[in-house]
Image (cartoon, helix red, strand yellow):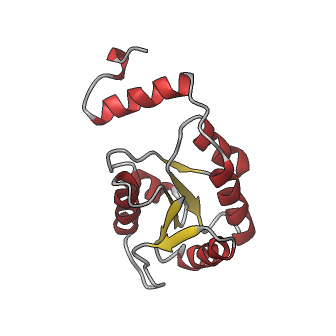
Amino acid sequence: MKIALSADHRGSAAIRQLHEKLRREGKDAAVVGECGGSTCDYPEMAFQVAKAVADGTYDLGVLICGTGIGMSIAANKVKGVRAAVAHDEITAQLSRSHNNANVLCLSADLLGQRLIEKIVDVWLKSEFEGGRHARRLRKIAAMEEGLDPATVQE
């Protein structure tokens, strides 16, 4: 599993530490479009990771900004991306098991490094349940095509 990582200036230290941890664990993770600590605009980092996940270069992505919200909004503009903000292990787990999120967005300002790493661990270990959730993802995919999700049947 290949994991793309990026952050804006508020999350750059956290993403570097997360990258080091994932690499120590033998995970195939790379920082894509690093901000480098100077002020930068989160949509640019979100786009680089989201595009790399959507085109299959990477399987999953993790983005960190001040709140995680801006990254999520920006990443979700890329077709095929399901970016979710998580603030704890349960929201991370549910974002994968129910929503099959392929990009995780986190807050550098609200979460400490230890919690960021725990959330990412849970998220990476969680699996999509399918079933009724798969139907809902088909409806989201229809919306990406400009269709009314109510028209999507089983």
Side of 58 where 97 appears, left or right: right
Res 152 → quadrant = top left
Q: Is residue 117 above or below residue 129?
A: below
Place of residue 147 in the rendered image (x, y in percent of width and height, measured from the top left): 27, 26
Q: Specify the quadrant that holds the C terminus.
A: top left
Instruction: Tally the numbered discs.
Output: 0
Task: Pick out the residue farthest to the left.
Answer: 146
Which of 99 and 24 lies nearest the eye of the viewer?
A: 24
Q: Residue at x 57, y 73 (%)?
A: 15
Q: Specify the quadrant that holds the N terminus.
A: bottom right
Place of residue 94 in the rendered image (x, y in percent of width and height, measured from the top left): 64, 40
Q: Residue at x 39, y 26 (%)?
A: 139
Q: Is residue 101 above or below residue 113?
A: above
Side of 95 where 41 appears, left or right: left
Side of 84 where 118 appears, left or right: right
Q: Is residue 110 above or below residue 13?
A: above
Which of 98 and 69 lies nearest the eye of the viewer?
A: 98
Place of residue 150 in the rendered image (x, y in percent of width and height, measured from the top left): 36, 17
Q: Residue at x 55, y 22 (%)?
A: 132
Q: Is residue 17 above or below residue 77?
A: below
